[in-house]
């Protein structure tokens, strides 16, 4: 199970449970979020993508705002609430964004591209690639709040430490004063193994219990849904579905609280 699985499930539950308007921005060249939302990655070659929005956001040595507007799409699912779940698709050519030796303006292109395009949404979720390269830093430059998805293992723990260090760098260099890790989710946990128990405790002790938004266990059903790019919400009604939803409810509740608090403050 990976981060895309969490992004899609959280997006769906924010819509279904709370009626929020959610936008998913796919910043992973693998384009799994786009595919999960119904985008035909291999055939829709002419459809504007997030890479087009980024490249169009810089012209004549200056940043251009709002270029992401033409890339926004409604999710393709046949559900009554599909107008509340929109996305900006990715394609494999997004990998080219990592080939440029970036300057400060380059990191700010996504922020410029999205400026003025999100007035119709309550929550924007970024599905970033599993790296600390240009693309995640572009997302952080346009964000106030970061939710980390990790696993209870040494390698994931080491990745968390590196991610935190890079976040502080972006916060300082890209002038994002409110950027902070507001929560984290431990994914793929097996409580019966001593190794997972150890790293779960270690992660919680260092990142804080108050920011631990939830733990999603390793389950064969979740792994299968992940392979199928399918959300838990679309399972047949069953006790298992309700049990899986229960793992996501505290995560979704935290994001809903954060989003609605921000909305009320802006009003």
Image (cartoon, rainbow, N blue to C red):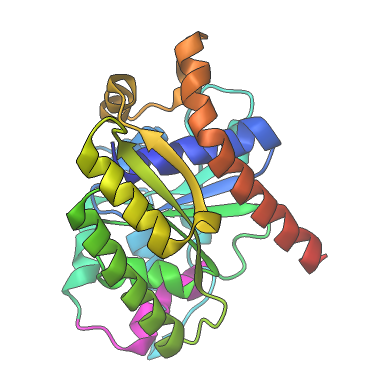
Is residue 141 or residue 222 the one in the foreground?
Answer: 222
Query: What is the number of callouts on the image?
Result: 0
Give the x, y percent position of residue 90: 33, 51
Taking the image as shown, residue 98 lies to the left or right of residue 139, namely left
Q: Residue at x 38, y 26 (%)?
A: 230
Residue 251 vs 177, above or below: the answer is above
Asked if the stretch drawn in magenta spans residue 102, the answer is yes
Give the x, y percent position of residue 264: 80, 60
Is residue 247 or residue 225 the one in the foreground?
Answer: 247
Q: Quadrant of the C terminus?
A: bottom right
Q: Main secondary structure of the magenta part?
A: helix
Q: Residue at x 65, y 56 (%)?
A: 258
Asked if the stretch drawn in magenta spans residue 123, the answer is no
Residue 70 vs 248, above or below: the answer is below
Residue 252 vs 164, above or below: the answer is above
Is residue 250 or residue 113 the one in the foreground?
Answer: 250
Taking the image as shown, residue 214 lies to the left or right of residue 20, namely left
Taking the image as shown, residue 249 lies to the left or right of residue 196, namely right
Tell me where residue 58 sits by quadrant.
bottom left
- Camera sees residue 193: yes
Q: Which residues are magenta?
A: 101-114
Q: Quadrant of the N terminus?
A: top left
Q: Residue at x 19, y 55 (%)?
A: 154
């Amino acid at each position: 199970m990976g981060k895309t699985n969490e992004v899609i499930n959280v997006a769906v539950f924010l819509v279904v449970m709370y009626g929020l308007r959610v936008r998913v921005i796919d910043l992973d060249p693998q384009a799994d979020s786009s595919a999960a939302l119904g985008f035909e990655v291999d055939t829709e070659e002419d459809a504007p993508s997030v890479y087009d929005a980024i490249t169009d956001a810089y012209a004549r040595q200056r940043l251009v705002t709002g270029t992401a507007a033409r890339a926004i799409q409604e999710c393709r699912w046949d559900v009554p609430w599909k107008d509340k779940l929109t996305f900006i698709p990715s394609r494999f050519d997004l990998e080219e964004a990592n080939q440029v030796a970036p300057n400060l303006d380059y990191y700010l292109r996504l922020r410029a591209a999205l400026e003025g395009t999100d007035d119709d949404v309550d929550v924007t979720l970024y599905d970033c690639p599993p790296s600390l390269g240009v693309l995640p830093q572009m997302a952080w430059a346009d964000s106030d709040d970061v939710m980390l998805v990790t696993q209870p293992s040494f390698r994931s723990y080491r990745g968390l430490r590196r991610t935190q260090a890079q976040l502080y760098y972006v916060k300082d260099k890209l002038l994002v004063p409110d950027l902070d890790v507001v929560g984290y989710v431990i994914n793929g946990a097996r409580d019966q193994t001593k190794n997972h128990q150890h790293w779960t405790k270690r992660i919680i002790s260092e990142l804080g219990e108050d920011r631990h938004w939830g733990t999603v266990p390793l389950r064969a059903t979740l792994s299968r849904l992940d392979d199928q790019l399918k959300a838990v919400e679309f399972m047949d009604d069953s006790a298992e579905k309700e049990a899986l939803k229960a793992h996501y409810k505290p995560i979704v509740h935290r994001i809903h609280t954060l989003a609605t608090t921000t909305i009320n403050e802006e009003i």
